Image (tube, helix red, strand yellow):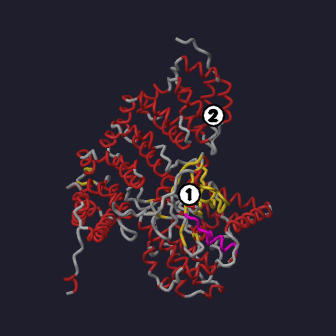
Amino acid sequence: MKGLFKSKPRTPAEIVRLTRDLLVQFDMDTIRESKRDEKMVELSKHIRELKCILYGNSESEPVAEACMQLTQEFFKENTLRLVINCIPKLNLEARKDATQIVANLQRQQVQCRLVASDYLERNIDLMDILMTGYENTDMSLHYGSMLRECIRHQVVAKYVLESEHLKKFFEFIQLPNFDIAADAAATFKELLTRHKSTVAEFLSKNYDWFFAEYNSKLLESSNYITRRQAVKLLGDMLLDRSNAATMTKYVSSRDNLRILMNLLRESSKTIQIEAFHVFKLFAANQNKPADITNILVANKSKLLRLLGELKTDKEDEQFDADKAQVMQEIASLEPKELA
Amino acid sequence: MGKSGHGKRSYSVNANDYKLLEEIGYGASATVFRAIYVPYNEVVAIKCLDLDRCNSNLDDIRREAQMMSLIDHANVVRAFCSFVVDRNLWVVMPFMAEGSCLHLMQTAYPDGFEEPVICSILKESLKALEYLHQHGHIHRDVKAGNILLDTNGVVKLADFGVSACMFDSGDRQRSRNTFIGTPCWMAPEVMLPEKGYNFKADIWSFGITALELAHGHAPFSKYPYMKVLLMTLQNAPPGLDHDRDKKFSKSFKEMIAMCLVKDPAKRPTAEKLLKHSFFKHAKPPELSVKKLLADLPPLWNRVKTLQLRDDAQLALKLLPSAQQEAISQNEYKRGVSAWNFDIEDLKAQAALEDQD
């Protein structure tokens, strides 16, 4: 008989509904002050339960059917917006749980569809809220990590890339708090590498302002870590086959060459090696404009000495082969008449 | 506004606000300093990490810094803030005045601690593990050297240099395939990278740490890396079964045996283990641990002495054995970097070493 009085365990959908009801109350501020703490405890508990359904716990793995039910109910209504709005009102543990829930939901499928992607397409303004996170130290890691998960969806990445938000990354990457700046840098990198066709289109349409900012704010930054990450990302972008048109344009500019040659001379070995991977593209270009050739010729002996001394810590055959080829190319260059 | 979990005071991200004092810890690419945060005139610890020497990508460092700034547990060392100074990353943390349990044993308790003290230290560390596991983190380097003590007896687990976050990618994947940690404390499944491992790897390391605190050193600690790998994989799990271990209680031995089961599925979770009878009567660390610390020189002098001792030992070492160690070390690194654990091959190599 005992079992009769035991409350039945709630279904995932029920927990989502209970969570949503409480979120609505917090969002609208309709809770009496005396009830606030109690309701917050309740809300945190539900959020923890949702996380356990999606991730399992140290004893058990998540169950696909339960995850599916949860996801379906979650996106049936505006739960994601409520969660994002209410994050600042939650305590630290609930914020972390909620962030992990949002991250996980981006990958959940219902009937072979990424429901999160469909939802975000209709609610793309949520990205504007997530972007404000970088301007608020307490929110930045939560909103930042949600944002990075949301741009897994191509429509969302496209929106952020083409919005005014992108310009702000050049500032956020250099924020003094390492954890926040590094978060912005990770998202920036995702935006510019993940969805090939979107990135290629973006770079060719926005070439002028984008690389002007990229060069002056990132590659020539006074901050070591900014330069290091920027030159690495530049290599990743230019060496990607889908960005070939952008690459050809980039390596035909003497201003760009000058910046890369400066990076090649840095005292940091890590930056030197990363800079080499971009510099080699200038040298290897078979249709070098005359002014590029002439800069390389004018600096021939200095470049050859510098490259000769440049070595990776670990043996790297590809690097050695590239280096030999670049050195050979530079050694054989003759000055060209300027057109 | 609502309640924020971080209702703590904030620290600036300006290097000029900090005054570096003595070195209190050193590692391959990081040095830890005692420092003063000038605006509050407060002692803090600053870990300075040379970023140019971390040539792997910076994502792992970002994850570590983010995780440490989002920690809110009495037994886990959190980061107040972190920022870049030239090529170094500075991570500002609370100063744990008595250093690590390893330091303390090396300085004053070479044969380990008494059981009640061990019980307090382990219970606090286990609470830290329970919290980390609940948040999806595997610590991956649980050992006495990472259990820090404060003057008031407070115990905190530190150093997530190698900790992995399984939730970071939002993935359901619950196992990691990275070979990392310190061999003596490493669970057998961690040594076989193709298998992957989970939270339970920390429970094994916790068991080894219990033995370390009881004896003053980890089992197998005198053997070269390669040999440790083999012994962990092939031998029966170590335990408290020597003559000198008679002084320890049955429940202590039993608790260790539960952690050191080779099949990770059969090890208890941190949450379960906390309910073990061994921890039922644990004294608060403010009582038991504090007694250990009486009459010791300050931490920075201890560190200096240990550093000098290390150097002297290295210099004294006869060349052949030093060479042997270097070879073993290289072999180990090769195995790790190539991820090619051919056990038969390892056995053959170790057999050759034995004959020397």
- Residues tagged 2 and 1 counted as in contact (Cβ below 8 A): no
Q: Name the residue under label 2.
A: A265
Q: Does the rendering let one see residue B70?
A: yes
Kindly state the secondary structure of the residue where label 1 is placed.
helix
What element does badge 2 sit on?
loop
Q: What stretch is highlighted in magenta?
A: B94-107
Using the image as rendered, state which of residue A118 and residue B317 is in the foreground: A118
Amino acid type shown at disc 1: Pro
Position of A38 with respect to B111 (left or right) is left
Q: Tell whether A313 sits left or right of A35.
A: right
Q: Where is residue A297 in the image (x, y as percent from the top left)?
A: 62, 20
Q: Can residue A12 be seen in this view?
A: no
User: Looking at the picture, how far across and down is residue A328, in whole percent?
Assistant: 63, 26
CA neighbours of label 1 inside 10 A, class few (<14), some (14 to 19), many (20+): few
List the residue tagged with mark 1. Answer: B39
Do the dots labelled 2 and 1 sit on one chain? Answer: no
- Give how far across and how far down residue A258 sits, in percent: 56, 27
Label 1: chain letter: B
Residue A248's place in the image compared with B270, above or below, is: above
Residue at position x 66%, y 85% from top?
A: B244
Residue drawn at x 46%, y 75% as measured from the top left? B267
- Report, in whole angstroms, how far the alpha carbon at label 2 lies from the one at label 1: 39 Å
Q: What is the tally of numbered marks visible in this picture?
A: 2
> Disc 2 or disc 1, which is closer to the eye?
1
Determine the chain carrying the residue at label 2. Answer: A
Q: Tell me, yes or no, whether the highlighted magenta stretch contains residue B97.
A: yes
Q: Where is residue A30 in the image (x, y as percent from the top left)?
A: 22, 63
Task: Tell whether A192 sits left or right of B16.
Answer: left
